[in-house]
Amino acid sequence: MDRRRVLLIFGAAWLSAALLTWFLYSSARAPRVEKTVAIVAAARDLPAGTRLRKEDLKTVKVPERDLPKTALLDPKQALDRPLLFPVNANEPVTGTKIGSATGVEGLPAAIDIGKRAISVPITDSSGVSGLIQPRAHVDVLFTRPGSLAEAVTTTILEDVIVLAIGRTTEGTNSTTTPAANAQPRPPAQSATLLVTPEQSRKLELAKNEGKISLALRNPLDHTVASDSSATTSQSLYAGLPLPKKAGDERPKPPQIIVQKAPEPKEPPKPKRVVDVFRGDKHIQESF
């Protein structure tokens, strides 16, 4: 092999080694492109109990390898749901930090600032046969028991929002077909109302003084009734005979039958006795 060919081979090998070294060095210095995923994060510091709105959320990109297991990928998944824990700005909003939109854990977030939530007992009749659903508007009626002169019914609250019926905070969908093996839901025994602090005190007193009933009203009707007078038993029975109480009926006195004394009989008239002698016989005859 001649010298020129040897030099060409060594030159090609050296050039190849130089190119390989430069490629490896450049690859080591070049930033590695990582795959990222957009997740939901807080747009500002949010305290616990905040019901999330669109302006409270944003999306941030994180490396796919650092993606939290309960991360939310769509802001719609967090809308109108309450925060269970405080979240700082730019912190990911995960499924473990928010409550259900219809669960009882989100009820405190549904209470407006300056309002209170208070529960009142209801029955099938006082709760309009179960037709009252969460977010409905109702009037609260109070009935004070007592005698005919003391019994009275009046409207103590008007246009009050129902937050929950029992432990349900979302109305039922009548178009949804229940499962075949689904157990019937027991009737609710309480209704949670959204009221002011003053109304909560009035409602608590009414619960302990008498009976409370709810009157369902149109959610678009916010008018206050001009007639706020109470209904009493006297006005209820106006023009009608008053009902008799069980203790008002007294037993009738026994009927006394007077028997007339028998009329005295006339004394028998005196008889006339005549002595009759016939021979040696003596006979007395009366006439």
Image (tube, grey):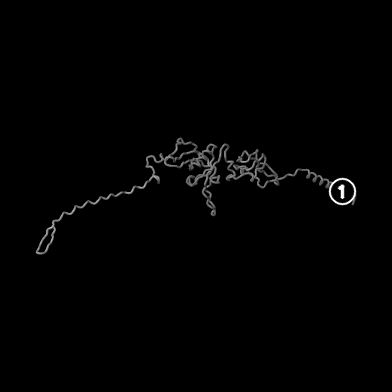
Residue 103 image position (x, y, % from top left)? 58, 45
| Residue depicted at x 87% and y 48% | 10
Residue 244 image position (x, y, % from top left)? 39, 44
- Pick out the residue farthest to the front: 280
Instruction: Name which residue type carries label 1.
Output: Phe
- Pick out the residue farthest to the right: 3
Residue 207 image position (x, y, % from top left)? 51, 42
- Decide which of 192, 202 is in the foreground and name it: 202
Give the total number of marks visible in the rendering.
Answer: 1
In the picture, the quarter occupied by the C terminus is bottom left
- Pick out the residue farthest to the left: 279
- Decide which of 279, 80 is in the foreground and name it: 279
Location of residue 115 by image quarter? top right
Q: Is residue 249 above or below residue 269?
A: above
Location of residue 270 by image quarter? bottom left
In what element is the residue under mark 1?
helix
- Pick out the residue farthest to the bottom: 280
Taking 78 as reference, is 231 left or right? left
For label 1, the residue is 10
Number of other residues with Cα within 10 Å of mark 1, as a class: few under 14, some 14 to 19, many 20 or more: few
Taking 135 as reference, is 259 left or right? left
Residue 225 image position (x, y, % from top left)? 46, 36
- Decide which of 143, 41 is in the foreground and name it: 143
Taking 240 as reference, is 182 left or right? right
